[in-house]
Image: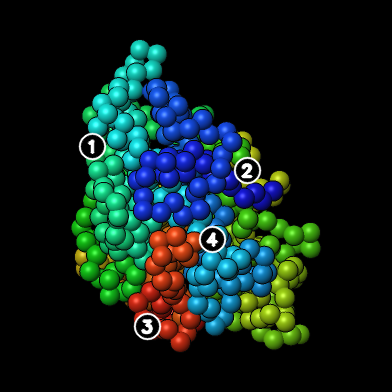
Amino acid sequence: MMKIKIINKIGAAIFCTALLFTACTNLDIENYNDPGVEEALGDAISVKSVLDGAINDGLAEHVGWYGVHIDGYADQMTTTNAYAGFWDWTEEPRLRINNHPTYANLNPIAIPWETFNSVIATTNTILQIIDVDGMEMIIDGTDYTNKLKAEALFMRGFAYGYLSMMYDKGYIVDYESELPVESSDYKALLAEAIETIDEAISLASSTSNFTFDVHSSYSIDATEFVKVANSYEARFMMAGARTDAERQALDFAAIKTHALNGITEDWAPPVLEDVLWNNYQDWSISILSDGAGYLPPDIKINHLMDPDYPTVYPDAPAILGPMVTDDLRADYFGYTDAFGYLNESRNRGLFTNYTRQRYNNESNTVNLAGLDVHMMLYAEIQYILAECELGLGNLDAAAGYLNASPRVTVGGLPDVPASAQAIEDALHYEYSVELDLGAGIATIWAFMRRYDLLQIGTPLQYPIPATELEITGDEFYSFGGPSYAGEAGTADGSNSWTLH
């Protein structure tokens, strides 16, 4: 059923051994299967193998199980289960992030940081081998130098994109950087991501034998790759805004261009069991023996679909009945009168009577060959385009994208009128309903923060993990908590969904 993904540590060895970073965080774990950097990168086949591992790790992390924690901040998931720190991400009033190395549940912050930085270190090393050392990537008589370089560039930009999306700052490092390296804010990380992905797109487009090898059983050609890469650029750029004020300052014209060059159908590669699967979905769709969800959807989603539904679960002995909605997508969620692991003594207001059904199956897992890994739905591109048109003042066009989306074509809801408030409300609804579990880690949290929809005291970003700060000698710091509302990195709650 649910599994904790163990990342490929060869990238970690490169990260530390090549001295491409000021600190190695927790990546200096001994790997008895690691042949060593020199041996591992001594020929083109080995370089490709290491790069394939970095691709697997990076793609897997953005649909990794730590996405369920962030869903707590976004009011997409609810629980009072303290396992793995889940409750710390859902509790109301919101808790300040415990960013200290003694905190037992730091992994949801530390592991994505380690994984994406490891991908950067691995790709930096490969780019150095190609660009500086001049090593040609000849495999079975065919020159794959530009192919591997383009793949490395994309994954480097991809990793920086997710660091910019999730953390307040990070380290911009390449093979020409000299130690020590100073941290850069999320805006600089985003700029690095876009520049690097643009370079990958350009090189892939001009390389005759280019394929992007998602995993050992699935590749896409240059045409499809360009669409996927542009789609991620649009996601990252839109997610760059931490507040509504920052959203209004986004370069909507540039984001629109990337989205128009993006995917035209769902980006959902096939599962490769225990290598690439949607572990984020796997934890979220799990149903307990009593019929309750293990990490069920938050009552906020029900409230959006049925405005008569409360935003806080009522006190005992009341048990809510099914929501009433005209949305034909109600079957994305399933009603149950069981509460599973929800613990009344912790916070009954966090309860729900719903489970996730859209991606569920008889096996209660998505780590099965023959299933799809939902990386990005085409609907997300439609919603990004609607946001761009809204930001550009083109209300008719914005409403048009929403009315051509699953909101109407699947849900059967009435057309959205061409008014700014109606469009914003519809976008909030669609991110919560249509994109639930289909948009990867942190996407809905990023949407909520850029419209100031998060509850008061919700962290708007993660700090550099304490495990890293402990090594660099920098002071521990954090975000979140109602008493810090309105400070940088903490939601002020001014437009919280709980007020709607």
Marks 1 and 2 in Cβ contact (< 8 Å)? no
| Mark 4 residue type | Pro
Q: Nearer the viewer, mark 4 or mark 3?
A: 4
Q: Which mark is residue 202?
A: 1
**In whole angstroms, how far apart are the C-alphas of marks 3 and 2?**
41 Å
Which structural element holds mark 2? loop
- Which label's residue is closer to the chain start, 4 or 2? 4
Residue extending furthest toward the right: 290
- Which label's residue is closer to the chain start, 1 or 4? 4
Question: Residue 275, percent across and down?
Answer: 56, 38
Name the residue rendered at 71%, 72% in the picture: 342
**In whole angstroms, how far apart are the C-alphas of marks 1 and 2?**
34 Å
Q: Which residue is mark 3?
A: 486
Q: Which mark is residue 367?
A: 2
Marks 3 and 2 in Cβ contact (< 8 Å)? no
Q: Which mark is residue 104?
A: none
Q: Is residue 368 visible?
A: yes
Q: Which residue is mark 4?
A: 108
